[in-house]
Amino acid sequence: MLQTFKNAWKIDDLRKKIIYTMIVLVIYRLGCAIAVPFIQPSAIKAMIAADSGNMLGYLNLISGGAFANATLFALGVIPYINSSIIITLLTVAIPYLENLSKEGEEGRKKIAKITRYVAVVIAAVLAIGYYFVLKNNHALLYTEGLSGFFAAVVIIVTFVAGSMLLMWMGEQIDKKGIGNGTSLIIFTGIISRLSNAVSAFVYMIQEAMAGKTINFVLVPLFLIFTVGVIAFAVVLNNAERRIPIQYAKRVVGRKMMGGQNTHLPIKVNMSGVMPVIFASSIMSLPGTIRSFFTIESEFANKLLDVFNYNGFVYALGYVILIVAFNYFYVSMQYNPIEIANNLRKNNGVIPGFRPGKQTQDFIARVISKLTFIGALFLVVVAVLPIITGNLTNTGIQLGGTSILIVVGVALEVAQQLESQMVMRHHKGFLE
């Protein structure tokens, strides 16, 4: 990967794209240091630490710690991500959006505009909600009255404006930079928080050197486990099933066309990190409800305690939702009937299966099996780091969502650089 980056740096237009992307990401990190007025960061950090697993902790993860520090980009790109997910789901249910998705470039532009408007609404709702959370937890620094109303407007508008600015920055990376802008912003935020894990790991080493014998076992085990999880995530992102395809020969004019043998690649992890993000969002709702409202009912509090981040019910629900969302997301992205019809139109056949119903059923079976395997892989990567962190009490928890995002984005950027270098006759990974 370093060699690919080095080769890309030698190409003038790729170098400009890389520099542009880095400048935008540096601006993002600077924005994460600009504090929002009237908010007390220490109170927010106490809220997040006191009730892990709620939406505040999830928001802090995706924003790269910006929410805990009450900065300009506290909401991060969550409103835009949620908006994109909602519009993607509604594209299947609403005929108008479905028709737009089939209209080519113009239709995609209209859908992108609708996604932005929905993102603004979601950002406003989140900003208002978190303002009241901060107010209920005494995290605001102002006196009641006119100043209170003014502070509310400033906080809400700043949260929304920061999120919309991030959305615009991500789109600029898509147009003028390298990689997916939104993914790179999340990637940068997660990487920026690695210092906390490094500090905790250094503390473990210091304790081991001071004579705490258990850390002589935990330190190497932690290193092995970290490398193993990252390697597992890389395999998960790259693994695919290749279905052989044969194209029949046909005469076009005086030329013989077709007769090629190729394959149809179907990735094991077809849905990426989306099922994990969906599951995290839903399982964090009980903790979020507790943060938003003051609940006096003893029964309601016990019910919410069942969904504690470290509890069995949370882990079980997390696993079930990851599997369910993986199947749902794949069913939206891959249509066996459409794939089979496209093969038949292009005179392509899968050896041993007749065009039409047999081909459709075979592709459906393959996709179903790969979806299940991909869901199990996602469950392992998402849940094992949490379990390990709780068992070892190391204070280091490598979130599965974080690992999948970091690995996926890094591989995506490397592939984009490689593909652009291949177009310019550079070897890159092919060396």
Image: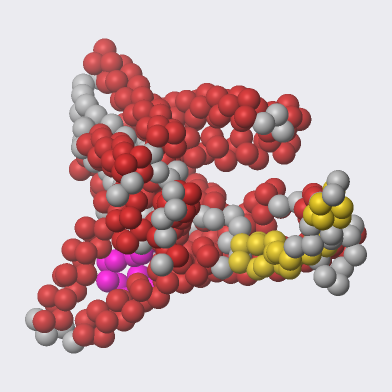
Whether 211 is drawn above or below 353: the answer is: below
Quadrant where the N terminus sits is bottom left
**Which residue is painted at 40% across and 43% down in the image?**
178
Q: Which residue shows up at 65% across the image and 68% down it?
A: 241
Q: Quadrant of residue 296?
A: top left
Colouring scheme applied when the structure was drawn: secondary structure
Whether residue 221 can be seen here: yes
Closest to the observer: 347 or 255?
A: 255
Give percent across and percent down for residue 379: 53, 66
Residue at the left extreme of this rendering = 210
Can residue 220 be found in the magenta stretch?
Answer: no
Q: Is residue 414 visible?
A: no
Using residue 177 as the reference point, say whether residue 43 is left or right of it: left
Location of the C terminus (image quadrant): bottom left
Side (left or right) of 271 relative to 98: left
Could you say where residue 351 lies in the image, as x and y percent from the top left?
A: 82, 70
Q: Is residue 393 magenta?
A: yes
Q: What is the x, y in percent for residue 260? A: 75, 62
140, above or below 242, in the image: above
Write the residue at 24% across / 29% down. Answer: 36
Q: Which residues are magenta?
A: 387-400
Q: Out of 258 and 341, give the one closest to the viewer.
A: 258
| Left or right: where 356 falls relative to 137 | right
Residue that appears at 73% across and 36% down: 93
| Residue projecting furthest to the top | 146
Q: Residue furthest front?
A: 254
In the figure, residue 198 lies in which quadrant? bottom left
Give the mark count: 0
Q: Nearest the camera: 200 or 411?
A: 411
Percent x, y of residue 295: 44, 42
